[in-house]
Image (spheres, rainbow, N blue to C red):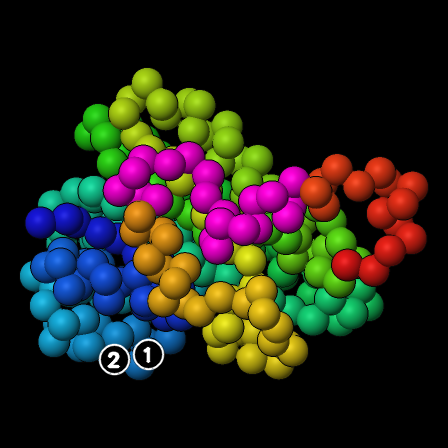
């Protein structure tokens, strides 16, 4: 029985991942900001076959509360086999350009809160000699683009942090998985125009579960984003600043 902590459990990708694990009889501890929503998801997962489902509501911008939350989760599950961190938000880029406070909030929730909780989780996994820390970053972090560079810069910080953490924890037997989805059709992106490169939460969740099982380090979801972003990263800066992406 897998013991799985999901932080940001009310996100569409996290919920789809939790359903996969519930169908396999996992024990789950869910953390989300909306009490009613996280409770409803927990009830659904119990029906789907999860061995244990416990949950709590927490604002992950409250860094000081992370340690106690992890203590409660560890007590409920008896340790962690997998920790999935999937919280975040996508503010309007133009609004972030016009408001320092909004831009800083975007960095805080998408980057600093992730680093804060990972910093507390890492020694726990290292001490138990294994486990998986899987964290949602984004292809947006591979190169800053005018359309979403505030969000992208937060994800770039997360990806760089996880790269270093992966090196640090490798000798402890801990898998650190960086998950880089492309655009996903979720409530967070409801206002955006969809296209053929968009993925569903269910397909991304299947990729996450597969990446964990295969002990990958970095995954792009869907996989075609890996060569696309390799090309995007290789565009010379003189040309890149003249094109719209």
Across and down, in percent, residue 214 comes to: 30, 38
The number of numbered badges drawn on the structure is 2
User: Residue at horizontal 64%, vertical 48%?
Assistant: 228
Q: Secondary structure at mark 2?
A: helix
Q: Nearer the viewer, residue 230 or 91?
A: 230
Which residue is the site of mark 1? 37
Element marked by disc 1:
helix
| Marks 2 and 1 close (CB-CB < 8 Å) | yes
Mark number displayed over residue 124 = none
Residue 86 in sight here: yes
The reply to whether the magenta stretch includes residue 3 is no
Q: Residues within 10 Å of mark 1 (few under 14, many from 20)?
A: some
Left or right: 117 in relation to 51: right
Q: Magenta segment range? A: 211-230
Residue 182 in the image, given as x and y percentages of width and height: 55, 58
Q: Is residue 142 above or below residue 160?
A: below
Give whichever of 7, 198 is nearer the camera. 198
Q: Quadrant of residue 82?
A: top left
Q: Is residue 31 visible?
A: no
Pinpoint residue 237: horizontal percent, then vertical percent. 86, 40
Q: Is residue 75 above or below residue 31?
A: above
């Amino acid at each position: 029985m897998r013991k799985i902590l999901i932080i940001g459990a009310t996100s569409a990708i996290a919920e789809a991942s939790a359903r996969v694990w519930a169908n396999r009889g996992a024990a789950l501890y869910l953390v989300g900001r909306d009490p009613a929503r996280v409770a409803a998801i927990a009830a659904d997962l119990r029906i789907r076959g999860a061995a244990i489902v416990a949950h709590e509501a927490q604002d992950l911008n409250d860094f000081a509360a992370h340690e106690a939350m992890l203590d409660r989760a560890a007590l409920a599950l008896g340790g962690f086999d997998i920790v999935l961190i999937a919280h975040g938000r996508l503010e309007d880029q133009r609004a972030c350009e016009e408001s320092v406070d909004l831009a800083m909030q975007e960095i805080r929730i998408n980057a600093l809160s992730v680093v804060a909780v990972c910093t507390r989780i890492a020694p726990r996994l290292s001490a138990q000699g294994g486990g998986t820390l899987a964290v949602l970053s984004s292809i947006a972090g591979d190169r800053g683009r005018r359309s979403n560079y505030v969000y992208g810069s937060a994800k770039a910080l997360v990806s760089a942090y996880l790269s270093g953490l992966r090196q640090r924890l490798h000798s402890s037997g801990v898998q650190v998985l960086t998950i880089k989805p492309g655009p996903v059709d979720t409530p967070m992106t409801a206002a955006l125009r969809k296209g053929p490169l968009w993925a569903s939460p269910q397909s991304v969740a299947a990729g996450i579960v597969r990446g964990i099982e295969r002990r990958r380090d970095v995954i792009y979801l869907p996989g075609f984003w890996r060569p696309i972003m390799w090309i995007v990263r290789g565009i010379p800066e003189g040309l890149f600043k003249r094109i719209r992406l």
